[in-house]
């Protein structure tokens, strides 16, 4: 899905993000560039091309208080998002993503009779494991924090009776749609495989505009179960199509990041990437 240069830049920026994530505001441009074995000017150009903003601005978005700022400034109450115009200016995911859901009976059979293709691809958030059927992408997992072996085992366990075939060539066009270059828009087709309650939660996540966040309690109200925040949190954590179904945009009411299945550094990076895109 990437040219050699693009793949190299993804790897380079991933290392830079890890350094920024570890060092926060204490690292200077020269510090980070030196770790990348690049001149400050060259690193600045590469990073700005990748993220759309300067490394300094990105550092600010990666700090721990970024989630609280998002909640204060870009908190989306899902019931009113359309009324206040976020569906137009906020690039709602459901304008660009098409999806359909597996029937509850099929889901209960654990994927029996289902053929799922899989492959590894580079993304702005580290190695991504993409799984898909003829009906669309059904899974995206990230290995930067947990490692490739654990990521694969995690995804395979979700549909234990399905047939899995490694086929990155067939999946490559869908991967390119899922992870367009900086400034592009994801346009992939999704196939949601989950229990009815989970799918309701995932559909609610799909209505959160890029660059905005919501809370677990807002999601619970949106799906008609205002007291089911714990169950909502569990369903968010079991989202199989990370990034495209934006569970990273769900925060605690306090402004805390909450958990993230693939690691909090990945969640923080996703939120910062989107802040850069919508700045």
Image (cartoon, rainbow, N blue to C red):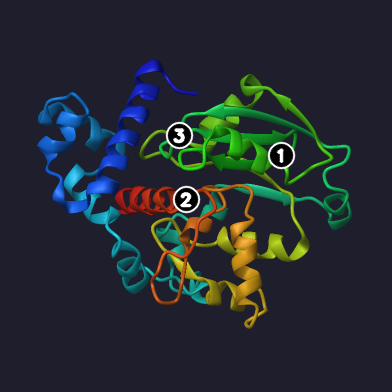
> Is the residue 201 above or below the residue 177 in the image?
below
SS at badge 3 = loop
Query: Dot 1, crowdedness within 10 Å: few (<14), some or many (≥20)?
Result: some
Q: Position of residue 73 (x, y in %)?
A: 32, 70
Q: Residue at x 63, y 27 (%)?
A: 171
Q: Report if residue 54 is visible in the image.
A: no
Query: Dot 3, crowdedness within 10 Å: few (<14), some or many (≥20)?
Result: many
Taking 96 as reference, is 70 left or right? Answer: left
Q: Residue furthest bottom?
A: 227
For the image shown, how many numbered marks are present on the structure? 3
Q: Which residue is mark 2?
A: 263
Q: Which residue is mark 3?
A: 123
**Which quadrant holds the C terminus?**
bottom left
Residue 126, by quadrant, is: top left
Measure how far apart labels 1 and 2 are at the Cα level: 19 Å
Specify which label sits upstream in the sequence, 3 or 2. 3
Q: Position of residue 117 (x, y in %)?
A: 71, 29
Nearer to us in this view, 245 or 108: 108
Nearer to us in this view, 163 or 181: 163
SS at badge 2 = loop
Q: Which residue is mark 1?
A: 156
Q: Position of residue 115 (x, y in %)?
A: 80, 32
Instruction: Tell me whether the residue at label 3 lies in contact with that at label 2, contact meaning CB atoms closer than 8 angstroms.
Output: no
Q: Report if residue 257 is visible in the image.
A: yes
Q: Residue at x 50, y 24 (%)?
A: 1
Q: Residue at x 48, y 75 (%)?
A: 77
Q: Position of residue 267 (x, y in %)?
A: 43, 52
SS at badge 1 = helix
Residue 194, by quadrant, is: bottom right
Taking 148 as reference, is 196 left or right? Answer: right
Taking 63 as reference, is 137 left or right? Answer: right
């Amino acid at each position: 899905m990437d040219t050699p240069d693009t793949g190299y830049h993804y790897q380079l920026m991933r290392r830079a993000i890890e350094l920024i994530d570890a060092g926060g505001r204490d690292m200077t441009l020269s510090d980070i560039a030196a770790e990348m074995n690049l001149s400050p000017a060259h690193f600045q150009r590469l990073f700005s091309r990748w993220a759309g903003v300067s490394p300094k601005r990105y550092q600010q978005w990666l700090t721990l208080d970024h989630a609280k700022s998002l909640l204060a400034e870009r908190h989306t109450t899902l019931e009113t998002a359309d009324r206040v115009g976020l569906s137009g200016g906020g690039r709602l995911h459901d304008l660009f993503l098409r999806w359909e859901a597996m029937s509850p009976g099929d889901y209960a059979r654990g994927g029996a009779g289902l053929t799922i293709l899989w492959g590894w691809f580079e993304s702005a958030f580290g190695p991504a494991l993409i799984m898909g059927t003829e009906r669309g992408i059904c899974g995206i997992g990230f290995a930067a924090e947990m490692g490739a072996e654990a990521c694969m085992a995690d995804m395979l366990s979700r549909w234990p009776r399905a047939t899995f075939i490694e086929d990155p060539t067939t999946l490559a066009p869908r991967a390119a749609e899922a992870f367009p270059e900086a400034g592009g828009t994801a346009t992939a087709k999704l196939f949601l495989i989950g229990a009815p309650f989970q799918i309701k939660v995932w559909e609610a996540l799909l209505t959160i505009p890029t660059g905005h966040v919501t809370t677990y309690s807002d999601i619970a109200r949106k799906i008609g179960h205002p007291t089911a925040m714990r169950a909502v949190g569990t369903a968010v954590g079991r989202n199989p199509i990370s990034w495209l179904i934006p569970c990273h945009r769900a925060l605690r009411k306090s402004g805390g990041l909450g958990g993230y299945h693939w690691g909090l550094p990945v969640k923080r990076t996703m939120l910062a990437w989107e802040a850069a895109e919508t700045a």
